[in-house]
Amino acid sequence: MRIGHGFDAHRLVEGRALILGGIRIPFERGALGHSDGDALAHAIADALLGAAALEDLGSRFPDTDARWKDADSMVLLAECAKAVRGAGFAIVNLDATIVVERPKLAPFIRRMRENIAACLAADASCVGVKAKSSEGMGYTGDGTGVAVHAVALLREAIT
């Protein structure tokens, strides 16, 4: 068994879409990033890669490479999952916590879980996603940013 932790944070700005878990969330601000800024997909990707002791998301898809400008982060996540499987591991489960004051994400959580599971070729029962407020504290509490923590558990694939 192998465990990995992933973290990502993005500034929230006007003129960008807020995308989390491949879902476009109606909101007046979105995540500033080189790709589509999906912090949930990014944190999960790094948790998976870390558990497999593979290079991180930024090394695989650097923001200095124009090919990844506005990239769909779910495509990047699927590529990371493929690399993890290629390294001889199977995904047991993952859990992620989105920290943001607004918007409220409860209506979107089920669809995020389903999107992530489909992207990883996993069952949705193996994917946990929850949203938490930071009670007005810090960049996630004052509305200027979103942060995500994720953990992934892998096992050696049975051949």
Image (cartoon, rainbow, N blue to C red):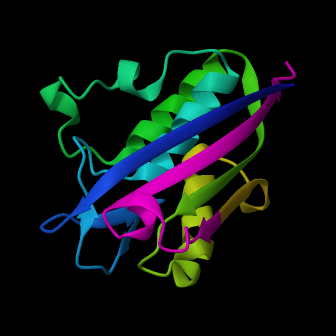
Residue extent of the magenta highlight: 130-159
Q: Is residue 111 above or below residue 59?
A: below
Counting from the top left corner in percent of width and height, residue 140 is at: 43, 62
Relative to residue 126, is residue 112 drawn left or right?
Answer: left
> Looking at the figure, which quarter contains the N terminus?
top right
Classify residue 67 as left or right of residue 3: left
Q: Who is closer to the viewer here, 48 or 100?
A: 100
Residue in the image at 33% along x and 26% along y: 61
127 relative to 90, above or below: below
Residue at point 26% right, 43% down? 35
Task: Say which quarter of the image contains residue 30.
Answer: bottom left
Q: Is residue 2 above or below residue 70?
A: above
Q: Is residue 22 visible?
A: no
Image coordinates for residue 66, horizontal then vertical, percent: 13, 29
Q: Quadrant of the C terminus?
A: top right
Image point (40%, 43%), residue name: 75
Residue 91: x and y in percent read 74, 37
Q: Is residue 148 magenta?
A: yes
